[in-house]
Image: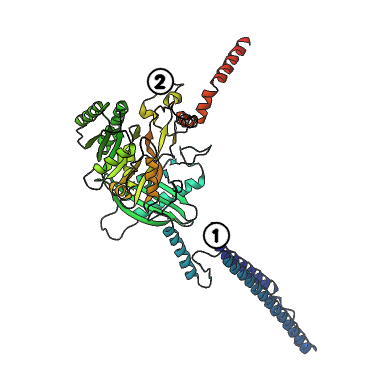
C-alpha cells in the first residue's frame, strides 16, 4: 500500500519533468531554426542595379517561405506535446482508478493548494488511525506492537536476531539519522516560544533528553514519545511525535509533574526469606533513598518463615525511617494472582500507581520514573520487558570470583536476554486494575494469571505500552523440575531451565567441554615433542 501511494504521488512529478523536457527541446529547436539576424542577412542588390525590383521580390519570397516553414514546425511540436500530455494524463487517471487512495486525494496540478490540503488531511488521518491518542482492541497478546527504547547513546531492542544485541549503538545509518532527527525536532519544539509566557524561556538541548520509546505500525507510521528533564526535580517534559510515512508531526507538548505520584509496590510471598532480604536491600537503596515516593505492600501466604520476613521489614523500617509499608498475611495456599489482587484492593488512599513485583526482581530509580511516565489513568498501562539474568556461575565460571550483584547487572548478549514472553511485572493505576476486573482468582500457584490480565487490557481501549527497559532485571534462581511431571512436561521444564541458564554459545562450551579439554591436551603433547 505504501509503495502504491508513493508511486501515485510520484507520477505528477514525472509528468511535470516530461513537460519541462519537451518545452526545453522546443526552445532549443526554435533557437536553432530562427531566421538569421540583421547582421547575417542576405546581401541586398545595389540600388542602381537594373535588377533591383526582381532582387527584392526574390528576397521577400525567400523570407516568407522560411517563416511559413517555421510556423508549420512549431504547430507540429505543439501538437506532439499536447498528444503526449494527454497520454500521460490518461495514464495517471488509470493509475488512480486502479489504486484508489483511502481519502480519494485528487492530484490536480491546476489547483496545487487543494492538492496540498488533501495530502495534509491524509497525513493527519494517519495519526487518527494509528494507536496514538487511545488504545485499540486487540485479539491476542501477540497482536500488540511493542515499543523499543533509546537514549542519546544506545538503543534497547527486542528483535536481536543472530547479529544484533539487546543493547547497542545504532549501527545502521538510517536508524541513527532517524533518532537524531526526532531528538532535534523535539528540542526545537521545546525551544519554540509559546507566545503566552513573558518570562525568558529555558533553552533545551539534547543533553536534557532522558529517554524515548518508539514503534512503527507498518501501514500508518512511527510513533515517538520522548522525555526531557523539566524545570524542577521530579518534573519532566514529554514530546509525542508521529511520522506518517512523511514529515514528522508534533502531536503533543505537555508538562508532566510526577513529584506527588506515589507507587505502591505489591509483592506476593511465601517463605523465601533470604530472597526477601536481598530484595529489601534493593528496595531500600532505590525505592526509599533515591526515589522516596513509594509504598510497599507484602502479601504473605502461610506462617512458615513469616516472623523472619516481618523482622526484615521492621528492621528496614527503623534503620531507614520508613513507615510506608503494609503487611498482609493470608492462611491459604500460595497464589500469585490472589496475593496481587488482595494487595491492590487493600489500598484505601487516593488513586495510586500499582507496580506488581516479585521477590527476585531488581529495579532502579530510573525504572520507577518510567513506571510513572508510561501509565495514565483511563489511558495507558505499562508492561515493561525486563532483562533476565543468566546463571552467574556459568557466565563468570572462568573468573577468579563472581562479581557483586550490581556489577552483574549489565545488558549484554552474554549476560541475559529480554524476557519478552513474561507479563508478570506491570504498572497501572489502581482505578484501571479495578475497572478491568482484576486477576482471575481461580488460577492457583505460579503462571497464567499475568497473561490473563494482560489479555484483558489488550481487549480494552487502554493503550498498552510494551517496551524493554534498562532498569528492571530478573535475577537468576535455580529452576526445579519436579519428578511428578509427565515426561513431556519434564522435557519442557528442562528446556526452559536451559534457556535461563546461559546463552547458546556458553551452553555449547559446556556441551563440548570434554572435546575442548582433549584438544588442549593434544596441543600440549605436540608442543613437548617439538
**Residue 137: % across, % down:** 41, 53
Circle 2: element type? loop
Could you say which disc has been placed on residue 6 in the image? 1
The residue positioned 25% from the left and 39% from the top of the image is 294
The residue shown at (40%, 20%) is 401
Q: Residue at x 46, y 31 (%)?
A: 493
Query: Would you say the residues marked 2 and 1 are in contact, meaning their CB atoms lie under 8 Å apart?
Result: no
Disc nearer the start of the sequence (2/1):
1
Residue 401: mark in rendering: 2
Pick the front one: 11 or 416: 416
Question: Can you tell which quarter of the image residue 241 is in?
Answer: bottom left
From the top left corner, tell me how far across and down residue 477 is, in percent.
39, 28
Which quadrant holds residue 425?
A: top left
Q: Look at the numbered disc 1 and give the secondary structure of its residue.
A: helix
| Image coordinates for residue 127, horizontal then vertical, percent | 42, 58
Q: Residue at x 21, y 45 (%)?
A: 349
Task: Tell me: 50 left or right of 190.
Answer: right
Q: Quadrant of the C terminus?
A: top right
Amino acid at each position: 500500500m505504501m509503495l502504491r501511494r508513493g508511486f501515485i504521488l510520484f507520477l505528477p512529478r514525472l509528468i511535470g519533468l516530461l513537460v519541462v523536457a519537451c518545452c526545453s527541446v522546443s526552445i532549443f529547436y526554435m533557437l536553432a531554426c530562427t531566421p538569421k539576424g540583421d547582421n547575417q542577412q542576405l546581401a541586398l542588390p545595389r540600388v542602381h542595379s537594373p535588377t533591383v525590383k526582381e532582387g527584392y521580390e526574390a528576397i521577400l519570397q525567400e523570407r516568407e517561405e522560411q517563416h511559413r516553414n517555421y510556423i508549420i514546425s512549431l504547430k507540429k511540436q505543439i501538437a506532439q506535446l499536447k498528444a503526449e500530455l494527454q497520454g500521460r494524463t490518461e495514464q495517471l487517471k488509470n493509475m488512480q482508478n486502479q489504486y484508489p487512495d483511502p481519502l480519494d486525494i485528487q492530484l490536480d496540478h491546476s489547483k496545487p493548494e487543494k492538492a496540498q490540503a488533501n495530502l495534509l488531511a491524509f497525513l493527519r488521518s494517519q495519526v487518527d488511525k494509528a494507536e496514538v491518542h487511545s488504545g485499540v482492541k486487540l485479539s491476542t497478546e501477540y497482536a500488540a506492537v511493542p515499543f523499543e527504547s533509546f537514549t542519546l547513546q544506545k538503543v534497547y531492542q527486542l528483535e536481536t536476531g543472530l547479529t544484533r544485541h539487546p543493547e547497542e549503538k545504532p549501527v545502521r545509518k538510517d536508524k541513527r539519522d532517524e533518532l537524531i532527527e526526532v531528538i532535534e525536532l523535539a528540542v526545537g519544539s521545546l525551544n519554540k516560544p509559546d507566545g503566552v509566557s513573558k518570562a525568558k524561556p529555558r533553552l533545551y538541548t539534547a543533553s536534557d533528553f532522558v529517554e524515548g520509546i518508539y514503534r512503527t505500525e507498518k501501514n500508518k507510521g512511527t510513533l515517538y514519545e520522548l522525555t526531557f528533564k523539566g524545570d524542577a526535580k521530579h518534573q519532566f517534559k514529554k514530546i509525542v511525535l508521529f511520522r506518517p510515512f512523511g514529515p514528522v508531526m508534533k502531536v503533543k507538548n505537555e508538562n508532566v509533574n510526577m513529584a506527588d505520584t506515589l507507587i505502591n509496590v505489591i509483592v506476593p510471598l511465601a517463605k523465601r526469606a533470604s530472597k526477601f532480604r536481598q530484595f529489601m536491600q534493593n528496595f531500600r537503596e532505590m525505592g526509599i533513598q533515591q526515589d522516596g515516593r513509594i509504598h510497599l505492600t507484602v502479601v504473605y501466604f502461610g506462617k512458615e518463615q513469616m516472623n523472619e520476613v516481618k523482622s526484615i521489614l521492621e528492621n528496614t523500617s527503623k534503620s531507614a525511617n520508613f513507615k510506608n509499608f503494609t503487611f498482609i498475611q493470608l492462611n491459604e495456599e500460595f497464589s500469585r494472582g490472589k496475593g496481587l489482587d488482595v494487595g491492590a484492593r487493600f489500598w484505601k488512599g487516593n488513586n495510586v500507581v500499582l507496580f506488581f513485583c516479585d521477590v527476585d526482581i531488581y529495579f532502579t530509580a530510573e525504572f520507577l520514573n518510567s513506571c510513572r511516565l508510561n501509565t495514565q489513568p483511563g489511558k495507558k498501562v505499562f508492561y515493561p520487558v525486563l532483562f533476565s539474568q543468566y546463571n552467574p556461575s556459568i557466565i563468570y565460571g572462568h573468573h577468579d570470583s563472581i562479581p557483586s550483584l550490581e556489577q552483574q547487572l549489565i545488558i549484554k548478549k552474554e549476560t541475559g536476554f529480554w524476557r519478552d514472553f513474561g507479563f508478570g511485572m506491570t504498572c497501572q493505576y489502581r482505578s484501571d486494575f479495578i475497572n478491568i476486573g482484576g486477576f482471575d482468582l481461580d488460577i492457583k500457584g505460579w503462571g497464567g494469571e499475568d497473561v490473563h490480565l494482560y489479555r484483558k487490557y489488550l481487549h480494552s481501549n487502554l493503550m498498552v505500552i510494551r517496551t524493554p527497559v534498562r532498569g528492571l532485571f530478573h535475577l537468576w534462581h535455580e529452576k526445579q523440575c519436579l519428578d511428578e511431571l509427565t515426561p513431556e512436561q519434564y522435557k519442557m521444564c528442562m528446556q526452559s531451565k536451559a534457556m535461563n541458564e546461559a546463552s547458546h554459545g556458553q551452553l555449547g562450551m559446556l556441551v563440548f567441554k570434554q572435546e575442548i579439554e582433549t584438544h588442549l591436551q593434544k596441543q600440549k603433547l605436540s608442543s613437548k615433542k617439538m
